[in-house]
Amino acid sequence: MTPGHSHTRVPDREPDGLRHWLVAGGVIRNPANEVLLVENRRRNGEVDWSTPGGVVDPGEEARGGLSREVMEETGLHVGEWAGPLYRVEVTAPGFGFFLEVEAFLATYHQGDLVIEDPDQIVISASFVHQDEAVRLLDSAPRWVAEPLLEHLRFGINDGRLFAYDLHGSSREDQKVTRRA
């Protein structure tokens, strides 16, 4: 759930001088109550795990963009989304962006996992138990891992906001603080 998909138009700078990104993330569970996580290889070569999803294209609604992203990244067709389970905002003036994320729960899905990501970011996908999700999400940015883990552990599904400030201007000096 990170900005920067190659097929997505980079948003114009808003009046606050930041690029605004709308991202949708999908929580998908199988009959064994395992959650689907995707392994992402970022442009800088780093690897992290997240739920499937991505940038919502201009003119798309969040759920429609999410269904498209999930199909592209995993091959799964989601029939219906519930939520949002939670929302995330990340303000990062030093990096030049404001990120808004809505996470939804798949109430029905079908298909086989097939990785054919046109952005070539997703390199694998797997349904995992909660304990394994905790381990894998250790690689993810705080604003990705923390809300998802609160959903998995405590059933957070009321649309609450998780707000973060990303301080610094490079990976080496970045610091994340949670506002809400």
Image (tube, grey):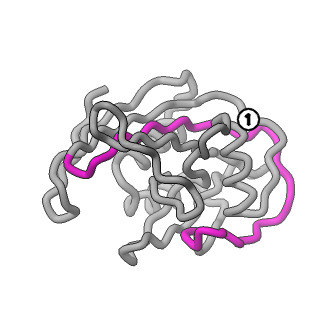
Question: Who's the residue at 46% across and 43% down the image?
Answer: 21
Quadrant placement of the C terminus: top left
**Residue 29, percent across and down?**
70, 48
**Residue 26, percent across and down?**
63, 45
> Please, is residue 53 above or below residue 112 in the view?
above
Q: Quadrant of residue 126?
A: bottom right
Question: Who's the residue at 54% across and 68% down the image?
Answer: 39
Q: Is residue 102 magenta?
A: yes
Give the class, few, some or many, for how many residues have Cα within 10 Å of label 1's Cα (few <14, many ≥20).
many
Image-based side of 79 in relation to 16, left or right: right
Question: Who's the residue at 15% across and 51% down the image?
Answer: 168
Image-based side of 29 in relation to 176, left or right: right
Q: Is residue 80 magenta?
A: no
Amino acid, disc 1: Trp
Q: Nearer the viewer, residue 138 or 81?
A: 81
Q: Nearer the viewer, residue 30 or 108?
A: 108
Q: Quadrant of residue 147?
A: top left
Q: Secondary structure at mark 1?
A: strand
Q: Nearer the viewer, residue 129 or 5?
A: 5
**Residue numbers of the magenta segment:** 94-122
**Residue 102, percent across and down?**
54, 35
Residue annotated with mark 1: 81
> Please, is residue 80 above or below residue 131 in the view?
above
